[in-house]
Amino acid sequence: MLTALLANLSPLVSHRGWPSVAVDVDTWREIGTALREGRFELLAEWGETAAVRCVLYQPSSGAIYLVTLAAEAGAVPSLAQFHAPALRLERAISDLFALRFIGLPDQRPWLDHGRWPMRHPLAAEYPMPSPAAADRATPSPEVNYPFLPTRGSGLHQIPVGPVHAGIIEPGHFRITASGETVVRLEARLGYVHRGVEQLLIGRSIENAARIAARVSGDSTVAYSLAFARAVERALQFDPPPRARWLRAIMGELERLANHLGDIGAICNDASFALLHAECAILREATLRACAQAFGHRLMMDRVIPGGVTTDLNGSTIEVIQALTQRLRSQFPELIELYENTASLQDRTVGAGVLTPALAAQFAAGGYIGRASGRAFDARLALPYAPYDELPIVAPVRREGDVNARVWIRILEVQESLRWLEAALDALPRGLIQVSLPTTAPSTALEATTMVEGFRGDVLAHVRIGPALVIERCHLRDPSWFQWPLLEAAIYGNIVADFPLCNKSFNCSYAGQDM
Amino acid sequence: MRPWLTQLLQLALVLVLAPWLTGLTRTFKSRLMRRVGPPPLQPYRDLVKLLRKETVVADNASWLFRAAPYLIFAVTWVAAALVPTFCTGLTFSAAADLIVIVALLGTARFFLALAGLDVGTSFGGIGASREMMFASLAEPAMLMVVFTVSLFAGSTQLSYVSAYMLSTHAGLSISLALALVALIIVSLAENARIPVDNPATHLELTMVHEAMVLEYSGRHLALIEAAASLKLLLYLSLIACVFTPWGTAEVDAGAWAYGLGLAAYLLKLIAGASLLAVSETATAKMRVFRVPEFLGVALMLGLLGAILLFVSRLS
């Protein structure tokens, strides 16, 4: 019913790609109901000066919609009152924009910790990033942040972070425990909010691409790719075929490096340092091969709108082939070690179970969703070149425990190796870059895309103004829908298993905090 | 050499060797993971560094928090000096036996747990509660081992036990084997080693021993680190003294025998450190609630050893 409704609405002409419709308040509420009933998945929700937008995905048909609702007197109905996964997104939107969500179940701020020099930093008219005078004058109010209550006898709270003992990003975790058993975990994030969305406004496309590449350093290729594809789609031009293949090769190399690092780090959190050391060696080999082949260990700024900056030649292709051969010969031994170490299996099997129902409700992407039965992979569901020509297989498990998340990573490493080898053989010849169109569009043009990073689907939305500058850009990290699930997965586990479960999720702080 | 002089030598020796043993274990572990790792002398440098650093104490810390490191260090040092290392028949032997060692270590643990609770941080509380949960099984298991060994040798005095083991009366015994396994399990737990605790972890939520000492710094931390090293040395020395007493010198033997005893002792420590490194590399840490089962095994083995010995004596 809603599908028909959305299909019949006249699409916004400025949006390129996915169908984009403007809806009224009643349809917006109906969307909320459809989300609650699981007919649609919410893939993103973000704010504009006087509107909210969300991306809906229908798993049964593969249909995807960008929906826009104009705010009436600065207020919109909350989707979170129907659909919990929208909660943190809407809290973040009301921190950044002067928008009120009617019926928002949780009124606490999310990104605004009361330490900003201004309120609602994005509540301004585009394209200039200057907040409204009233907001600019008022520093954000001191925040009293009550954590969610727990009741019961003998409960005690353990505050962890935001500064941790290891070299990781900042985030606060409030654990309420009964003895060793976790009764409630609540995360408080936003400590690495850098105002990325504001930084992007008014930038040239080249400049904005460099910022987009730095949202979450471990996913820099995925972010660059998402941003570049959105720009290319908005301006309606295509990068050369060779560039698309090179982009995907970089993406798979990024996946390899991160998965290898994660597998080792998860084992290290179970105090099995041997696998950590061995995986670190393979991760380092991958990063060095990337540095040799593309001139940067993380391949930062190698993917740009219009193509890629670095080409592969015969010798650098051999470097990557040597890497895949080395991984093929050494990685299976590590899997065997993982499988045959009973003490390690005892820690990972059955720990931190995420149920398939929750994974589906939150539209959890990446290894978290695929370890809990949600088969979604942007490379398959919304295929983009070259995965349409050379398909990739996304492994799925249903157990949803730490072991399943390790196994999804193991299988993805193997699949990426297979795909990389085939891609290097099939790499088309030609240019690697075309220049951006220089003729200014008559109106603002926008597009939304999604790519699969190692952690899950990264969504990018851009609107390019007539002067060929970014009017608005929203980058949605997969972690937005994964962090809340960690709180569910840890329930009933013991306090000492939290680091292990957390590492198996390995959500991004920087990507979520923006 | 006079016994009191030997005892003094022993006091100095354990203090000097303990950080080296800790460092040696770390070096072996690093090598097993294909890392260069710190040199075995690194813990000395760490101790010197900590002694030079400012000692920061929480505002709400009581006298207990300040006194505990000295107490823990002193008690552990004395306990370590009671175990014959390179020679038997020390001056303190007559006064101090296995049960005294267990009691001294129990005292140190008691004060460490109190200090962990004293400043009222959540990690200190978690560490102290886990430590006490483990100790409630580790201590009886240790006593069972003590009983088995004493029953076997006919004395709780370590010098006597060591001499008895060397003599022809000893021979092989099932009970001793059970006691050895139990003692190894207790040693791993008492020294906060994998699979019970991870001395190298940075994850506060998984810590046991480290969680209790998180608030310590400067010279306080140096003393606690030194005490932890002494404890590891003590347990390794204990296993060496009871189960591999070969080479240990008699108290009135000459310098040559002393030298031989020392060489044998060092070899045993190196062997112990390498075995510990291998076992720590090959296993992951247990879930917290599995540790009581693990220690329960030690307790049962100790008990079984003692009962078997009784039954065989009766029949």
Image (tube, rainbow, N blue to C red):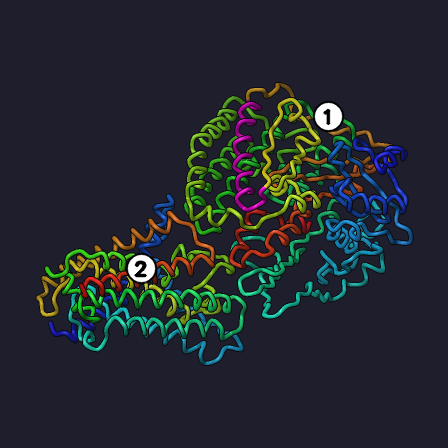
Q: Which residue is found at the position 54% from the left and 58% from the top?
A: A494
Q: Residue B185: x percent and y percent? A: 34, 58
Badge 2: chain ID = B
Q: Do the residues labelled 1 and 2 touch (CB within 8 Å)?
A: no
Circle 1 sits on which residue?
Answer: A238
- Secondary structure under badge 2? helix
**Span highlighted in magenta in the image:** A399-424
Kindly report the distance in space between the C-alpha atoms of the residues bearing marks 1 and 2. Answer: 73 Å
- Secondary structure under badge 1? loop
Is the residue B98 above or below the residue B20 in the image? below
Q: Which residue is found at the position 64% from the left and 43% from the top?
A: A356
Magenta stretch: includes residue A421: yes
Q: Residue A506: x percent and y percent? A: 58, 47
Identity of the residue furthest to the bottom in this view: B63
Is the residue A109 above or below the residue A294 in the image? below
**On the rendered structure, is B144 left or right of B192?**
left
Question: What amino acid is labelled 1 in the image?
Answer: Asp
Is the residue A318 above or below the residue A230 in the image? above
**Closer-to-camera residue (A63/B156):** B156
Is the residue A9 above or below the residue B288 in the image? above
Magenta stretch: includes residue A212: no
Identity of the residue furthest to the front in this view: B315
